[in-house]
Image: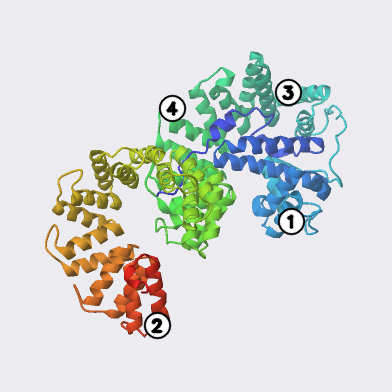
C-alpha cells in the first residue's frame, strides 16, 4: 500500500528525555494548575510547539499541539473571554479548538472570527464565543494533562498567586498528597514551601502512598537533569522502585527510564524492559509501548516481532492511539503474526478516534481498497481529512489526491492544491511534488512550484528531482538551465525513475546542456525502457530508426514502439501506427495502424489524431467514417495540428461528416493559417 505511513512515532525518545516534575498514571488525580502556573505552563507549551514542532514528526507535533491547546482551555476556563482577547497565542489556541481540535465540535464561523481578531480584521471576539469552554472541551483538556481537580473560575486574566502555606499533615493520604503536589508544581516555585511539601511527599511515600513515591522519584530525576548530582539518581531509583512495588505504573515507568536513558548513567536494558512490562501490567499504555520497542529493537531481550505485536496490542487495549496505530500496522503488514486486514481496519479506526493521525491516514488507505472490508471512498476521504487536520503531511497529500480525482466527494482542483500545499509546508516531500504538479496543470505559480520540486528532491523524493529538472529545461519558474537539469535527472535516474533516465538521455542525444553523447543516450534509454518507462522505449526505438547511436534496425524499433504503446506512451503508439501503416520493420498492417493511432490520439498525440482521422476519411484499415473523421480532425486541431485544422475546414464547408458550417469552416481555416498551414491562408 504505497500511501500509508510506516514511520514509528518516536515516543521513546520524547518520553525518556523528559524531566517534568510528574508523569504517568499518578497524574490522573493531580490538581490542574491555576493562576500564574497555568499561564506559565501555556507559554512554555506554546513555545515548545512553535519552535520544536517544526523539527519533529507529525505525531509528536500533534502531541505538542494537543498539550498547548489543553492549557489554553484551562486558561479559557480561568480567565474567560478577557484572557483570550489579551493574548495572541491563547487566541490562536482557541481558534484551533473551534477547528475541532479540543474534544468539541468544530465551528468554522467562530474559528474564522477569532483568526480575524488575531489578524486585526475585527476589533473584538465574536459574541458567539462563550465566556467559559464547553464541558466536553474542559474534560478533554483535563484528560490530556492528566489532572482532574476542578479549576478555579476567574473573571479576568489570572493574577500571580500568593505564596502557598506549607501543607498541614491533616486529612487522608490522598488529600495530603494533593496539597503537597500543588505546592511543588507551582510556577514560580516558592523555595521554602516547596521544600516542606517535598518532605511531606517523602513522608507520604513512607506511609505507602504510591503516587507520592512516584512524584518523589520524578522530582529527583528532574533535579539530576539540572545538577548532575549522582545522589539524586540513587534517590530517584529508590523511590521509583518503592512506587513500582506499590503498583504505581508511573513508578515502574520512571524506574525503567532510569535504566534506559544514558543521561542517568545506569543503562541496563534487561532491567529497563522488566520495569516497562510492569508499568504496562499496571495500566500504563506508555509502558506497553516501550516494552514493544525493546522487543522490536532487541534491547535487553532477543528481538521478537511476535512479542512486539503482543505489547502493542496491550497498549491499544489501554487506550493508546499510538499503540493502536502500531498494532494495526503489524496486522496490515503481517509483522510478528498473521496478515489481518480486517483487524488492522479496526485498530486503525480506534487509533484514529484516540488521536493518532497516522492511524487515520492508514485507515483511509485501507478503505480505498477491498482489504479487510468493502471499499468506502467517503469514509476514506473523511479519515484523510482527520489526519490532515491534525497536521499529518501524508494525510494531507492523500486527501489532496482524492479531492483532485473526485473520489469520496466532489472534484476540486483548487481544494486539492491547498491540501498539497499544506502537506508540503508540513515537510512531506510527495506533497511538495504534487503541489508543483498541480500548479503546472493549472499553469500558475511556477516559481513556487520550482521551489517545491527542489524541496521534494532534497528530501530524497526522486520524482521531485526529475520534475525539478524538467522545470529547469522548460524555463518554468525561472531561467533555463539544462546543464543543472542533467544533474537532477541523473539523481532521479540513479533512483530508478525511468522517465528521468529518458529525460537525461534526451539531453545527451540532443547535446542540450551537455555534449552530444550517443552511447550515453542509448544506455540511458535502455535503462529507462527496462524500468518499463514508455517514453524511454519510444526514444530507444527512435534511436534505432535514425541509426545515430547504433546501426539502424527497423525491426528492433518496431518492437520497442510496440512495448512503448503497451506502456501507454502516446508517442510510442503514434510511432507504432506509422510503422504498421508503412510496413517498416515488418508487414504492412493498416488495421493495426488504425488501432495504434487511436490509442495515441486518446493519449493526446496530435499526429496520431491526424493520421487516424485520415484513415477514417479515406477508408484505410477499415470502413470510411466521415463523422468519426470530422471529430478526430477537431481533436487534432484543438491540439494545434495545422493540417488537421485545414482538413476540418474543408469538411465543415462541404458538410461532410456533419452539417454545413461555414462560420466554423472559416474559424478552422484561420487557425490553420495562424499555425503555419500556407494552403489555408487567403490569396
Question: Mark 3 highlights which residue?
Answer: 202
The answer to whether the residues at label 3 and label 1 have Cβ atoms under 8 Å apart is: no
Q: Give the secondary structure at mark 4.
A: loop
Q: Of marks 4 and 2, which one's residue comes earlier in the chain?
A: 4
> Comparing marks 4 and 3, which lies closer to the viewer?
4
Question: Mark 4 highlights which residue?
Answer: 301
Residue situated furthest front in the rendering: 683
Q: Callout 3: 10 Å neighbours few (<14), some, many (20+)?
A: some
Q: Of marks 4 and 3, which one's residue comes earlier in the chain?
A: 3
Q: Of marks 1 and 2, which one's residue comes earlier in the chain?
A: 1
Q: CA distance from mark 1 to mark 4?
A: 54 Å
Q: Callout 4: 10 Å neighbours few (<14), some, many (20+)?
A: some
> Comparing marks 3 and 1, which lies closer to the viewer?
1
Q: Of marks 2 and 3, which one's residue comes earlier in the chain?
A: 3
At horizontal 15% and vertical 66% (from top left) the residue drawn is: 589
The answer to whether the residues at label 1 and label 2 have Cβ atoms under 8 Å apart is: no
Q: Give the secondary structure at mark 3.
A: helix
**Quarter residue 223 falls in:** top right
Up the image or down, 194 lies above or below 92; here it is above
Q: CA distance from mark 4 to mark 2?
A: 85 Å
Q: Give the secondary structure at mark 2.
A: helix
Q: Of marks 1 and 4, which one's residue comes earlier in the chain?
A: 1
At horizontal 62% and vertical 32% (from top left) the residue drawn is: 250
In the displayed structure image, the side of residue 185 where residue 482 appears, left or right? left
Question: Mark 2 highlights which residue?
Answer: 662
Up the image or down, 624 lies above or below 330; here it is below
Q: CA distance from mark 1 to mark 2?
A: 57 Å
Amino acid at each position: 500500500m504505497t500511501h500509508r505511513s510506516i514511520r514509528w512515532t518516536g515516543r521513546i525518545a520524547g518520553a525518556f528525555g523528559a524531566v517534568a516534575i510528574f508523569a504517568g498514571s499518578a497524574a490522573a488525580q493531580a490538581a490542574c494548575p491555576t493562576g500564574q502556573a497555568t499561564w506559565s505552563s501555556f507559554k512554555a507549551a506554546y513555545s515548545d510547539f512553535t519552535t520544536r514542532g517544526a523539527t519533529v514528526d507529525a505525531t509528536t507535533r500533534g502531541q505538542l499541539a494537543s498539550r498547548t491547546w489543553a492549557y489554553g482551555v484551562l486558561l479559557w476556563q480561568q480567565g474567560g473571554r478577557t484572557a483570550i482577547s489579551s493574548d495572541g497565542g491563547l487566541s490562536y489556541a482557541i481558534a484551533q479548538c473551534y477547528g475541532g481540535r479540543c474534544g468539541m465540535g468544530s465551528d468554522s464561523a467562530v474559528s474564522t472570527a477569532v483568526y480575524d481578531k488575531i489578524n486585526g480584521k475585527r476589533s473584538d471576539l465574536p459574541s458567539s464565543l462563550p465566556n467559559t469552554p464547553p464541558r466536553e472541551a474542559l474534560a478533554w483538556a483535563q484528560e490530556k494533562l492528566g489532572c482532574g481537580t476542578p479549576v478555579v473560575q476567574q473573571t479576568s486574566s489570572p493574577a500571580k498567586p500568593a505564596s502557598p502555606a506549607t501543607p498541614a499533615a491533616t486529612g487522608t493520604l490522598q488529600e495530603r498528597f494533593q496539597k503537597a503536589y500543588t505546592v511543588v508544581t507551582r510556577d514560580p516555585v516558592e523555595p521554602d514551601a516547596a521544600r516542606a511539601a517535598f518532605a511531606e511527599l517523602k513522608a507520604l511515600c513512607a506511609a505507602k502512598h504510591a503516587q507520592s513515591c512516584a512524584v518523589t522519584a520524578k522530582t529527583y530525576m528532574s533535579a539530576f537533569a539540572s545538577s548532575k548530582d549522582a545522589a539524586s539518581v540513587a534517590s530517584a531509583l529508590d523511590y521509583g522502585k518503592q512506587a513500582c512495588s506499590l503498583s504505581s505504573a508511573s513508578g515502574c515507568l520512571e524506574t525503567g527510564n532510569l535504566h534506559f536513558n544514558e543521561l542517568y548513567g545506569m543503562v541496563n536494558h534487561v532491567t529497563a524492559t522488566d520495569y516497562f512490562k510492569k508499568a504496562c501490567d499496571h495500566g500504563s499504555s506508555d509502558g506497553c509501548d516501550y516494552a514493544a520497542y525493546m522487543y522490536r529493537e532487541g534491547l535487553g531481550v532477543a528481538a521478537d516481532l511476535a512479542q512486539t505485536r503482543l505489547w502493542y496490542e496491550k497498549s491499544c487495549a489501554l487506550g493508546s492511539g499510538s499503540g493502536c496505530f502500531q498494532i494495526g500496522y503489524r496486522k496490515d503488514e503481517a509483522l510478528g503474526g498473521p496478515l489481518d486486514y480486517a483487524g488492522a481496519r479496526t485498530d486503525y479506526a480506534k487509533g484514529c478516534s484516540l488521536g493518532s493521525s497516522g492511524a487515520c491516514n492508514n485507515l483511509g488507505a485501507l478503505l480505498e481498497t477491498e482489504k479487510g472490508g468493502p471499499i468506502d471512498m467517503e469514509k476514506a476521504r473523511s479519515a484523510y481529512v482527520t489526519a490532515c487536520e491534525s497536521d499529518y503531511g501524508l494525510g494531507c497529500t492523500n486527501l489532496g489526491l482524492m479531492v483532485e480525482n473526485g473520489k469520496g466527494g466532489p472534484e476540486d482542483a483548487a481544494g486539492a492544491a491547498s491540501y498539497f500545499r499544506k502537506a508540503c509546508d508540513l515537510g512531506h516531500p510527495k506533497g511538495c511534488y504534487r503541489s508543483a504538479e498541480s500548479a503546472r496543470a493549472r499553469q500558475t505559480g511556477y516559481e513556487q512550484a520550482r521551489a517545491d520540486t527542489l524541496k521534494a528532491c532534497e528530501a530524497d523524493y526522486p520524482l521531485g528531482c526529475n520534475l525539478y529538472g524538467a522545470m529547469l529545461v522548460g524555463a518554468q519558474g525561472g531561467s533555463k538551465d539544462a546543464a543543472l537539469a542533467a544533474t537532477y535527472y541523473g539523481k532521479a535516474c540513479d533512483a530508478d525513475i525511468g522517465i528521468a533516465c529518458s529525460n537525461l538521455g534526451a539531453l545527451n542525444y540532443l547535446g542540450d546542456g551537455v555534449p552530444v553523447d550517443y552511447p550515453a543516450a542509448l544506455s540511458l534509454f535502455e535503462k529507462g525502457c527496462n524500468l518499463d518507462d514508455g517514453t524511454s522505449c519510444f526514444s530507444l526505438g527512435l534511436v534505432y530508426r535514425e541509426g545515430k547511436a547504433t546501426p539502424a534496425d527497423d525491426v528492433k524499433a518496431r518492437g520497442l514502439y510496440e512495448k512503448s504503446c503497451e506502456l501507454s506512451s502516446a508517442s510510442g503508439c503514434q510511432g507504432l501506427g506509422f510503422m504498421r501503416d508503412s510496413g517498416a520493420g515488418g508487414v504492412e498492417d493498416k488495421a493495426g495502424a488504425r488501432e495504434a493511432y487511436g490509442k495515441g490520439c486518446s493519449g493526446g498525440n496530435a499526429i496520431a489524431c491526424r493520421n487516424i482521422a485520415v484513415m477514417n476519411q479515406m477508408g484505410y484499415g477499415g470502413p470510411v467514417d466521415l463523422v468519426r473523421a470530422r471529430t478526430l480532425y477537431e481533436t487534432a486541431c484543438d491540439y494545434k495540428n495545422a493540417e488537421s485544422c485545414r482538413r476540418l475546414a474543408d469538411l465543415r464547408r462541404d458538410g461532410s461528416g456533419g452539417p454545413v458550417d461555414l462560420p466554423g469552416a472559416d474559424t478552422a481555416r484561420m487557425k490553420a493559417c495562424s499555425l503555419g498551414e500556407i494552403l489555408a491562408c487567403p490569396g
